Amino acid sequence: MTPTLRDEAREGTIVTPLLGSRGTPPDFAEAYSRGGTALAGRIDPLEGAVISRGCEDADDEPYLFTELLVTAYAQEGGALVTGFDIVYTAEGDEHVLEVPWEVALCGPSVEADTTPSC
């Protein structure tokens, strides 16, 4: 899985959180993406990113929000991710955020009986 951050542009764009799509952001240019729409805003790698503003500062920033995008890859058999961790540093202390999201890329190797989304 490849994590990235997206800052949604404030002026002239519609807030469009991404729930799921085929292809790789920001352009979704792969043939299998079926003509996905490119994402507005700026896409940056997550590794080494510095997020210096809090929610209370949002009115003074040029972006409405910072969104975590996760790109998952699978072969024809599919794949199932049952969670991941985000390790970050705040005020000099390291923290781990456990994200229990289930990401299913349905295929014959993913058990439909135990994965209701397939």
Image (cartoon, grey):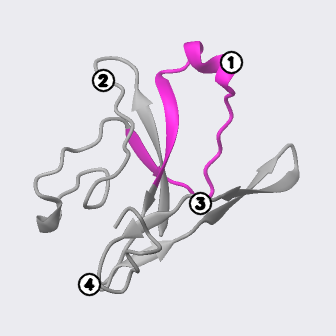
Mark nearer the viewer, 1 or 3: 1
Q: Quadrant of residue 34?
A: bottom left
Horizontal side, residue 94 vs residue 24: left or right = right
Q: Which residue is mark 2?
A: 14
| In the foreground, 100 or 13 | 100
In terms of secondary structure, where does tag 1 sit? Answer: helix
Q: Which residue is mark 1?
A: 56
Residue found at x 40% / y 20%: 10
Amino acid at dot 3? Glu
Mark nearer the viewer, 4 or 3: 4
* Position of 4 relative to 114 (above/below): above
Amino acid at dot 4? Glu
Callout 1: few (<14), some (14-19), or many (20+) C-alpha neighbours within 10 Å?
Answer: few
Q: CA distance from mark 4 to mark 1?
A: 44 Å
> CB atoms at circles 2 and 4 under 8 Å apart?
no
Q: Which residue is mark 4?
A: 76
- In the rendered image, residue 2, in percent from the top left (x then y), is placed at 47, 66
- In the rendered image, residue 3, in percent from the top left (x then y), is placed at 50, 60
Q: Quadrant of the C terminus?
A: bottom left
The numbered mark at residue 47 is 3
> CB atoms at circles 4 and 1 under 8 Å apart?
no
Magenta span includes 37: no
Horizontal side, residue 73 vs residue 21: left or right = right
Magenta highlight range? 42-69
Q: CA distance from mark 2 to mark 1?
A: 21 Å
Residue found at x 29% / y 23%: 13
* Position of 81 relative to 78 (above/below): above
* First of labels 4, 3 by sequence position: 3
Amino acid at dot 2? Ile
* First of labels 2, 3 by sequence position: 2
- In the rendered image, residue 26, in percent from the top left (x then y), is placed at 30, 50
